[in-house]
């Protein structure tokens, strides 16, 4: 896997954030978790 996208977005009104990791070449979701803290990105380090 060489191209990974990290998207931090609001899941619904009220500031409930989710972080999503996508494989850009395969066009698929790899992982999603609640929150936007940098610790969430450790999954792919």
Image (cartoon, rainbow, N blue to C red):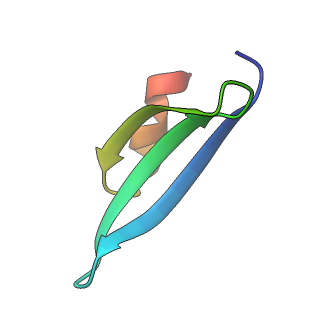
Q: Residue furthest bottom?
A: 13
Rendered position, 37 above or below 21:
below
Q: How many marks?
A: 0
Rendered position, 4 above or below 33:
above
Q: Quadrant of the N terminus?
A: top right
> Which residue lies at the image location 52% right of the left edge and 38% below the top edge?
21
Image coordinates for residue 33, horizontal then vertical, percent? 31, 44
Observer-nearest of 35 and 38? 35
Q: Residue furthest top?
A: 1
> Which residue lies at the image location 46% right of the left edge and 46% below the top edge?
20
Observer-nearest of 22 and 36? 22
Q: Is residue 43 found left or right of 26 in the rendered image?
A: left
Q: Quadrant of the C terminus?
A: top right
Image coordinates for residue 8, horizontal then vertical, percent? 49, 59
> Which residue lies at the image location 32% right of the left edge and 56% below the top edge?
35
Image coordinates for residue 37, horizontal then vertical, percent? 40, 54
> Which residue lies at the image location 64% right of the left edge and 33% below the top edge?
27
């Amino acid at each position: 896997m060489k191209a990974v996208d990290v998207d931090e977005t609001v899941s619904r009104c009220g500031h409930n954030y989710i972080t999503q990791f996508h494989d850009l070449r395969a066009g698929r979701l790899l992982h999603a978790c609640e929150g936007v803290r940098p610790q969430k990105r450790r999954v792919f380090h």
